[in-house]
Amino acid sequence: MRILSEASLKLSSIGFVVVLFLAASASSYAQGVLPNFADLVENNAPSIVEISTTRSVSGQSAIGDDEIEELLRRLNPGQEPDLNIEGLPEQRQRGAVGSGFVISSDGYIMTNNHVVADADEIQVSLNDRRVYDAKVIGLDEPSDLALLKIDATDLPYVDFGDSDSLRVGDWVLAIGSPFGLEFSAAAGIVSAKGRSMPGRSTYNYMSFIQTDVAINQGNSGGPLFNLAGDVIGINSQILSSTGGSNGISFSIPSNVAMNVMEQLRDTGAVERGLLGVRMREVDYALAEIFNMDRPRGAFVDDVQFESPAEEGGVLIEDIILEFNGHNIQHFTDLPFYVGQYRPGTAAKMVVYREGELKNLTVVLGSSPTNSVAVAEPVVVRERGNPLGFRVSELSDDMRRVTGLSGVQIAELNEGPGREAGLLVGDVIVSLNRQEIDSADKFALVASDLPESGFVPVRIVREGQGTTMALELAP
C-alpha cells in the first residue's frame, strides 16, 4: 500500500484540476472551433462529377512489344521476330479519369485541361449515377483548365468564391474521385499562396494555392471549397515522389478560373495581356542599392523594343510595385496579374525609380500564348524524320517578346531528340551549327544530316540557352 504525504495530496489535487481543465478546454475547442464538413459535403456533392475519357490509338497492339516478340519466337523458332506489322486494328484505350464540377444549371462543367485534352470521347458521371457524353467548349493549356457541356437541365451547381480572400491556415475541403473512388471528400488547410510550378511554361501565368489536402490521381479538376461552401480553387497538381499524396497539393485560384471560364464560354479561347519586360526578383542587395526599405516588387532587367512597357514609359532598373491595383511582392506575381487582363486593357502601374514612386499607364499587348497554342506543326519527313520530333514556327509575338529566332518542338516521339533530353516547348535556334530561323530551314538542315554520329543542337528552355548532342544511328 502506497502512503501519500499531505503535500503530495495537494499536488495530486492540483494536477487533477489541471487535467480536468485541459480536458474541458480540448472538448470546448473541438466543439467550438474545429469544423464539421458534413453539411458542406451533403450540400455540394450533387454538383461534383467524375470524368472518364477514351482515346483511339492507331496501329498499336493491345499488348506490349516485348510480349509480341516472345510470342513470335515461340511460333517461329529459329527466326528473328519482325515487329513491323502492318494493318493492326485501331485500339480504343481508356484515358484519364478525373473530376469536375457543374457551374450552371444548363450543364456547363469545369475540369482540368490535362484530364480531357486529346480525348476522342468524354463521359461525365453525375452523383445520381446519370451518365452523359460531354463536348468540349474550350481548352486552355496555360491555366490547365477546360470547359465542357452536357445536354442536361436543372442541374445543381456550385458557386465561386473569392480566392484572393483566402488566408494561410484557412480550412478547405476537396471532393473528387481519387484513384477512381468517386465522390470522396478530404479536408486540410491552406499551406501557402502564390506558388509557381517550375517547368510549366516560359510565360508563367499561374499562382497556385498550396494545401495539405490529400489530393491523388483522379482528384484533378475537382473543386476546393472554403467553409462557406464556395469553390475557391480547382485541384490541379500534387508534389510527390511516389505518385500519391505527400500532403503537398496545388489548386488553381477561383478568380483565375472564373476569368478563363467566361472567355472559354464566350469565344472558346483565352486571350492574355502582354507587358513586354524581362524581370527578376528584388533581393536584399538590390534593395540596399536602390535605397528601398525592404525587398519587394519586380526588378526590370530589360524592356522589349516597341513593347507595351516601352510605349508606357517603363525603363530598365525600374522596380514595379503595383499593377492595376495589385501589390507585387515577388517578381512572379507580375506575369500572373498581367495574364488576368485581356489585350488592349489600359493598366495603371506604380514603379519605384531613383528613390521616387512614378505612376504609369500601359496598354497591354497580346501574349504569345494566345497564338502559340494554335500554331500548325510543320512535319520533317525527310528520311523518316530521323530526329524523332516535330517542330512549329514561332509566332511573331513570341519572336518579338523573347528576341528568339528559331522553331519550337511541338511533338516528341522516340528517337535521338528524346534520348538527348529535349522537351516539348524547347526552342531550337541552331542544328549542326547552322542557324535555324524557320521550319523550312530546320527541314533543310535536318534532311542533310549525316547518317550516323553526333550532331549538336542549340536550344533555349525557360530563357536559358544550352547545347545538346543528338546521336544519329544508321
Image (cartoon, helix red, strand yellow):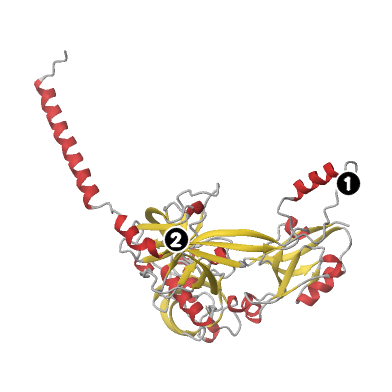
Q: Nearer the viewer, residue 45 or 332?
A: 45
Viewport quadrant of the N terminus: top left
Residue identifier under label 2 = 129
**x, y percent for residue 244:** 51, 49
Write down the residue under mark 1.
80
Residue type marked 1: Glu
Residue 78 higher or lower than 38, as above or below: above
Please state which of the two labelled residues, at mark 1 or mark 2, is closer to the viewer: 2
Depth check: give the residue in front, 346 or 163: 163
The residue furthest front is 130
The quadrant of the picture occupied by the C terminus is bottom right
Q: Is residue 36 left or right of residue 274?
A: left
Cα–Cα span, label 1 and label 2? 51 Å
Q: Which mark is residue 372?
A: none
Give the mark nearer the N terminus: 1 vs 2. Answer: 1
Which sits in the foreground, 309 or 470? 470
Residue 285 falls left or right of residue 413: left
Query: Residue 116: x percent and y percent?
Result: 56, 66
Position in image of residue 165 (x %, y %): 34, 67
